[in-house]
Structures are given as C-alpha cells and as structure tokens.
Amino acid sequence: MKLVLLLLLAGAAIFAGRWFLDEGRGHDLMTEDLLKSNLHQLMGAQDAFAREHGTFADSLAQLPGSLFWSTGVTIRITADSNRGWSARATYPSHEAGEELECAVYVGAAAPPLPRMTERKTRCR
C-alpha cells in the first residue's frame, strides 16, 4: 500500500513539475492546434472548390461563407490557381510582439516555410 501511495505521489510530482515548466508552452500548443485546424478546414474547402471549378481559390472570399475561422486567426492564401496554393495562419502569441504561425501548401506552390511536406501543416 505504501509503495502504491509513493508511486502515486511521485507521478503527481512529475506531472506538477512538467505543468509548471510547460505552462507557457501549453498555451502555444493549444494555439498551434487551433491554427492547424483552420488550415485543415481550408484544405478541404480548396479541394471542394477545385473539384467544382477546376482551379484553386485565390482568396478566402471565393470560398463558401459557411467556413468558420477561429477568432483572432489570420489566414492568407497565395495561389497559382491551376498548379497549387499555399496558406499561412497566424495568431498573436502571448509573448510580446511575436506571432505563432502555421502553414500548408498543395501542388506546385512554393512551400511557405522551410522543411515542409505537401499537405502537412508545419508551425513555428
């Protein structure tokens, strides 16, 4: 019984220590997930647009009004309508003057961030 209690206390101490060390980063991870979610929604909308129009949308205004972008997230599309597109999603960080940024690209568009793979979001 004492061993089980000791193990539980040790586990709680490790968890608490990680929480304190990662407290600021936890906010960034949640925001990163938010940005990735918005970019995945954009990928789906671009795929649907391309199936219907035979080209990619050059702007968010061309995509369906039913898309929901998270509050505070800014999305910018760069498109070569026939060959591909890329997008960046940004959100102000809790660090003064910094932004969290995630990006994605599809087709022959230039990757917006270094070391990217097509259709895989990457953040910095």
Image (cartoon, rainbow, N blue to C red):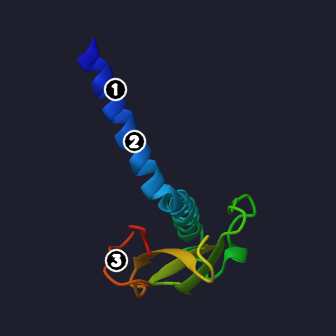
Task: Please tell me in which quadrant of the rendered image residue 3 appears.
Answer: top left
Please name the residue shown 35% across and 84% down the image.
Answer: 114
Please name the residue shown 73% across and 58% down the image.
Answer: 66
Which label sits on residue 8?
1
Q: Residues within 10 Å of mark 1 (few under 14, many from 20)?
A: few
Label 2 sits on what residue type?
Answer: Phe
Give the mark nearer the N terminus: 2 vs 1: 1
Task: Give the residue at the far right of this rendering.
Answer: 65
Q: Residue at label 3?
A: 116
Q: Position of residue 94 (x, y in %)?
A: 61, 70
Label 3 sits on what residue type?
Answer: Met
Disc 1 from disc 3: Cα separation: 41 Å
Is 97 positioned to the left or the right of 119 in the image? right
Label 1 sits on what residue type?
Answer: Leu
User: From the viewer's perspective, is residue 26 above or below residue 116?
Assistant: above
Q: Residue at label 2?
A: 15
User: From the viewer's perspective, is residue 29 above or below residue 6?
Assistant: below
